[in-house]
Image (cartoon, grey):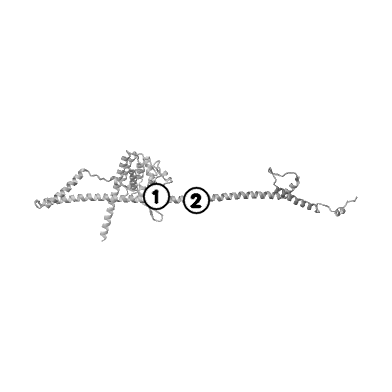
Amino acid sequence: MASLGVGLHVIRRRGAGRSAVVERRNLLTVCRFSVKTLLDRSCFETIDDTSPEFVNFVSILEHILSHRLKGQTTWFGYESSRSFWDYLKAACSKVPHNCIRSIESMENMRSSRAKGRAWIRVVLMEKRLSEYISSALKDLKTKRRFYEDGAIMLGEEAGLLADTLIGVNTIDFSFCLKGESLDGSCPAVIDYTPYLKFTQNADSISSDEEEMRTLGSSGSDSSTPDKMATAASIFTEQSNLVSKCKRFEQKYRMTLEQKGYLEELVCLREAQLSQAVSHNKALQQSLEDAHLSHTLEKEQLEYIVLELQDQLKSFQSLEQLSADMSLSQTSLEPSHTLSLEARPTGTHWHHQGKEETPSLRGLCGSLTSVASYKSLASLKSSECLASPATEISSPGFTPS
């Protein structure tokens, strides 16, 4: 049992290794096809973000750069996923006049995947994609630190990738780095339909018809008991039938696989469409909520402005009242009343070029009466008037 388990483990490892090799070869082959289709399309029209050939090329390049990329181990021992931008940022820092800092300083690029997609577009506009990839492949220590065994970037095929990308330098690109194509949440999906062949010429149709005729004729020949056939001829006919059936079965399986792939692609597009519709609904709802909140805030601010205006009016009235009170207090001071007594009764009192009001005249008259009463009382005091007794008793006084 132990030997059987070891054998199964070895078989699984070999199968995984073969699948990894097939995956690498397929990605590199599809990359060459995408570069070729991109060059062919650029001869007839300009290439932008909406071009399907460019979208497919970028998706293939992202898959190649992310193939068997190691995760980042945190302080707690957990492994978090990485993006190919982390590798490019570390491996391409020595490239002269690189655009790493400018990509890092972009405010609208927050996720690592979005920065990596922006980097691809910038280096394509600079026509230096192959130069960056070649420089990154020379840093073996950084490659070992970021990629696992069996990755495309660690294999010999990576040099062929850099040579393949040289052809892209002949295309003039112009991109906008503020579009939905740079969204880091959208996965990169490769469309294999442009590279599938569905050619069926007249020769293949005639050969299929001939095979069907031979099948029918062989069946009719074998069904007729009148014709004599040897055992060798029967054996050869049976072998021919078996080989033809195998060819038909192989064609049927190939067609069935292509049908399954197209159905999966349709399901994926439908899922992406439903996700985009739900995202659009969420954005519309958030826009309505923001409009409602802004309307409420505007009404609150208008109400606050009205309250502040009322408070300002009341404050101005209070200031006027306080000014009147301070004027009345200054008029109540004794020094001010004395100065009013010293003035002649026929003169008019002017204060800052204005005549006095009747109320102030009455107030001044009452104040002068109070002051005159105080002055008479002070004259009757012993400090100001001398009594006759004191005059008689004072020495040196001789009556007349």
Crowding at label 1, few (<14), some or many (≥20) Cα neighbours within 10 Å? few
Residue pointed to by mark 1: 280
Residue 53 % position (x, y): 32, 43
Residue 160 in the image: above or below residue 389: above
The amino acid marked with disc number 2 is Glu
Of residues 210 and 304, the one nearer the viewer is 304
Q: Answer with mark 1 or mark 2, whichever residue precedes in sequence.
A: 1
Of residues 193 and 285, the one nearer the viewer is 285
Crowding at label 2, few (<14), some or many (≥20) Cα neighbours within 10 Å? few
The amino acid marked with disc number 1 is Asn
User: What residue is drawn where x is 26% and y is 55%?
Assistant: 11
Q: Which residue is the extreme one toward the front?
A: 358
Of residues 202 and 60, the one nearer the viewer is 202
Q: Which residue is the extreme one toward the bottom?
A: 1
Is residue 263 visible in the rendered image? The answer is: yes
Residue pointed to by mark 2: 297
Q: Which residue is the extreme one toward the right?
A: 400
User: What residue is drawn where x is 18% and y is 45%?
Assistant: 207
Residue 187 % position (x, y): 35, 49
Residue 306 % position (x, y): 55, 50
Tell me where residue 5 sits by quadrant. Answer: bottom left
Is residue 21 visible in the rendered image? The answer is: no
User: What residue is drawn where x is 70% and y is 47%?
Assistant: 358
Q: Is residue 22 left or right of residue 176?
A: left
Of residues 345 and 241, the one nearer the viewer is 345
Q: CA distance from mark 1 to mark 2?
A: 26 Å
Q: Is residue 394 left or right of residue 42?
A: right
